[in-house]
Image (cartoon, rainbow, N blue to C red):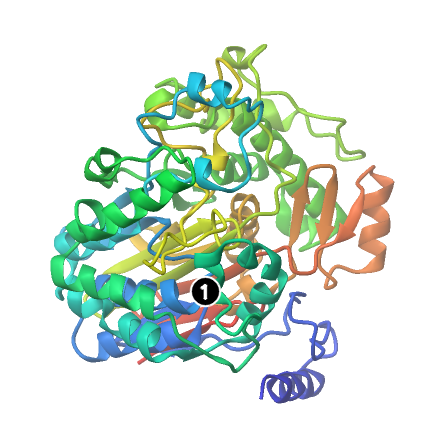
């Protein structure tokens, strides 16, 4: 069926355009300009997720009278079951929401903190010089269930029990495995086989699931049923918390019941900058929202439209802006309670962007960039630019009342920390790997502390009202993808589907990864500027978005061709 879809898509493109690169069957990871699907349309509501089963569940909630918050949590719970390598109730979430009643934008940070026992001395005692990439020491308290509870309690109209009901059905009775998730299963077979509880959960027949297989997770279904019965306290104070802590103790982990009991999500003010008359909203630290905003401030000083979309000069500007912003990320980003109170104001100022912009040489790539403020001089840095992590889901929902949700949920690495907690069916995240052990760095491991985060939901606002709610999952890719998506909308006038499907770049350490929609002449010109070009296939994450027509109020939805998702309205 999928091959038939792409064959039909290719035929349509041949009939309708000669200038756009055609999408060939099997070439899903490559975006292309002006040759995309049309946006989904709707008047009463819209949802876009990375998996069609989740979109269907969210749409039903909207059709049954629920609002965007109800639909978002319901879809997120389904995604926690049907995309198990990407996310789950053992992970974290963040959201930017617009509440139609108060006409205000709010940020929800439900990322978890480290154990109280996670001191630098404890890690030194274990002989560690760097944070491990996965395993029990990378597990912080998961924030997902608390985040669901907070969204529904403050803005929703349905109970948590009702919201998780479709997810329970999928976990208990099984669901058909989609194409990309089957590929994730296969790629991580050895990881899943290492641990008995994990193998029993995800390799029930001793082998990974393939496309179209029916997979059930009855252990996870029972955990979700406990949450439905007892609410969020089942996860943070009850039987689930006890089971997770007991399992971690057998693995020499650090979390205790007090760590779970003390977890709470924070309602925070999103941060933002104005980009050519549009307010772009991101989440504050400990996540990397300011990186996308700093990039946009730098990019604003160039006439991107005149440079041309995905021209060598345009991609050079985006790349160098990313490198500057990531230098600042490496020096400063941490739990906001451990950052200088004034640093964000400096990094997001237009004057600062003007200063940093002058460092960009349009003829050649810089050898490197340093953190740009005096406070960063001599400061130890962290650099995760080569870490191709990003097992995350992004979704967005909107309703006829005017509520809009931009929502992201994640385990971080593929299957998170790499193991399931006992008989819970819950895969735990590895967000703690985002800490550093560098003495004196604000992101150094410490007790009851949030690590550097990559999750960034976003929203573009015009005249005080949401215009576009969007996100692009994919670890370090997210901030630089956000900057490109905003430019696609604002500078290049793309519609909501096209803005996500257009070919993207991703700077990764010393490499500039490009999708195949960016042609040979552009690649040659970038190499002449000193960039090392690599294949970007499969490295660009996944985009979902809803655009609200300011004149008609009609919802326009986009879902990335790189994912198994669906935007659908009614």
Residue 237, position as x, y percentages in the image: 17, 45
Where does the N terminus fall, quadrant-wise? bottom right
Q: In the rendered image, which residue does mark 1 sit on?
A: 200
Instruction: Name the foreground residue: 109 vs 410.
Output: 410
Where does the C terminus fall, quadrant-wise? bottom left
Q: Secondary structure at mark 1?
A: helix
Residue 399 picture quarter: bottom left
Look at 64% across and 83% down and name the residue there.
Answer: 6
Instruction: Confirm whether residue 546 shows in the render.
Output: yes
Instruction: Name the foreground residue: 118 vs 251.
Output: 251
Look at 43% across and 27% down and name the residue there.
Answer: 334
Look at 74% across and 37% down and name the residue there.
Answer: 510
Look at 59% across and 84% down and name the residue there.
Answer: 2
Residue 56, position as x, y percentages in the image: 34, 78
Instruction: Name the foreground residue: 43 vs 231.
Output: 231
Instruction: Confirm whether residue 464 shows in the render.
Output: no
Q: Is residue 99 left or right of residue 208?
A: left
Instruction: State whether residue 157 is above or below residue 10.
Output: above
Mark 1 surroundings within 10 Å by alpha-carbon count, few (fewer than 14), some (14 through 19), many (20 or more):
some
Residue 137 picture quarter: top left
Residue 427, position as x, y percentages in the image: 41, 54
Residue 161 picture quarter: bottom left
Q: Is residue 303 left or right of residue 409?
A: right
Q: How many marks?
A: 1
Residue 420, position as x, y percentages in the image: 41, 54
């Amino acid at each position: 069926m999928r091959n038939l879809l792409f064959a039909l898509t290719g035929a349509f493109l041949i009939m309708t355009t000669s200038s756009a690169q055609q999408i060939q069957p099997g070439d899903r990871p490559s975006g292309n300009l002006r040759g995309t699907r049309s946006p989904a349309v709707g008047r009463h509501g819209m949802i876009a997720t990375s998996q069609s089963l989740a979109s269907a569940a969210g749409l039903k909630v909207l059709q049954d009278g629920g609002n965007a918050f109800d639909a978002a949590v319901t879809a997120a719970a389904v995604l926690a079951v049907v995309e198990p390598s990407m996310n789950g109730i053992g992970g974290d979430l963040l959201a930017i929401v617009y509440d139609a009643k108060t006409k205000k934008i709010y940020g929800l940070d439900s990322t978890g903190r480290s154990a109280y026992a996670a001191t630098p001395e404890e890690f030194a005692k274990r002989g560690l010089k760097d944070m491990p990439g996965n395993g029990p020491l990378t597990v912080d308290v998961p924030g997902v269930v608390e985040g669901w509870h907070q969204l529904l309690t403050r803005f929703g109209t349905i109970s948590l029990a009702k919201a998780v009901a479709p997810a329970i059905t999928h976990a208990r009775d099984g669901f058909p495995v989609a194409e990309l998730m089957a590929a994730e299963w296969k790629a991580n077979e050895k990881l899943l086989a290492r641990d008995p509880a994990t193998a029993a959960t995800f390799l029930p027949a001793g082998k990974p699931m393939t496309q179209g297989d029916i997979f059930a997770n009855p252990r996870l279904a029972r955990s979700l049923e406990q949450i439905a019965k007892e609410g969020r306290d089942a996860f943070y104070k009850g039987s689930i918390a006890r089971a997770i802590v007991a399992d971690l103790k057998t693995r020499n982990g650090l979390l205790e019941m007090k760590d779970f009991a003390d977890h709470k999500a924070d309602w925070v003010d999103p941060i933002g900058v104005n980009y050519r008359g549009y307010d772009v909203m991101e989440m504050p630290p400990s996540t990397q929202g300011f990186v996308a905003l700093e990039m946009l401030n730098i990019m604003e000083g160039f006439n991107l439209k005149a440079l041309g979309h995905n021209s060598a000069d345009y991609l050079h500007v985006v790349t160098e802006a990313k490198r500057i912003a990531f230098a600042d990320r490496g020096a400063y980003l941490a739990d906001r309670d451990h950052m200088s109170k004034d640093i964000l104001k400096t990094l997001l100022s237009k004057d600062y962007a003007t200063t940093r912009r002058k460092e960009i040489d349009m003829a050649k790539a810089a050898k490197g960039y340093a953190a740009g403020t005096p406070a960063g001089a001599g400061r130890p840095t962290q650099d995760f630019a080569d870490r191709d992590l990003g097992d995350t889901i992004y979704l967005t929902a909107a309703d006829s009342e005017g509520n809009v949700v931009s929502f992201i949920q994640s385990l971080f690495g593929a299957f998170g920390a790499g193991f399931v907690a006992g008989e819970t069916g819950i895969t735990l995240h590895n967000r703690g790997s985002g800490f550093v052990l560098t003495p004196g760095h604000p992101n150094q491991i410490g007790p009851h502390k949030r690590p550097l985060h990559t999750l960034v939901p976003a929203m573009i606002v015009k005249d005080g009202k949401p215009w576009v709610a969007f996100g692009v999952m994919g670890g370090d890719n997210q901030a630089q993808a956000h900057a490109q998506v905003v430019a696609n909308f604002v500078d290049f006038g793309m519609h909501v589907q096209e803005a996500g499907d257009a070919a993207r770049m991703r700077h990764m350490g010393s490499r500039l990864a490009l999708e195949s929609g960016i042609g040979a002449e552009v690649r040659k010109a970038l190499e002449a500027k000193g960039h090392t070009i690599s294949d970007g296939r499969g490295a660009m994450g996944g985009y979902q978005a809803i655009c609200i027509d300011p004149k008609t109020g009609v919802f326009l939805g986009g879902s990335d061709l790189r994912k198994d998702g669906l935007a659908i309205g009614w």
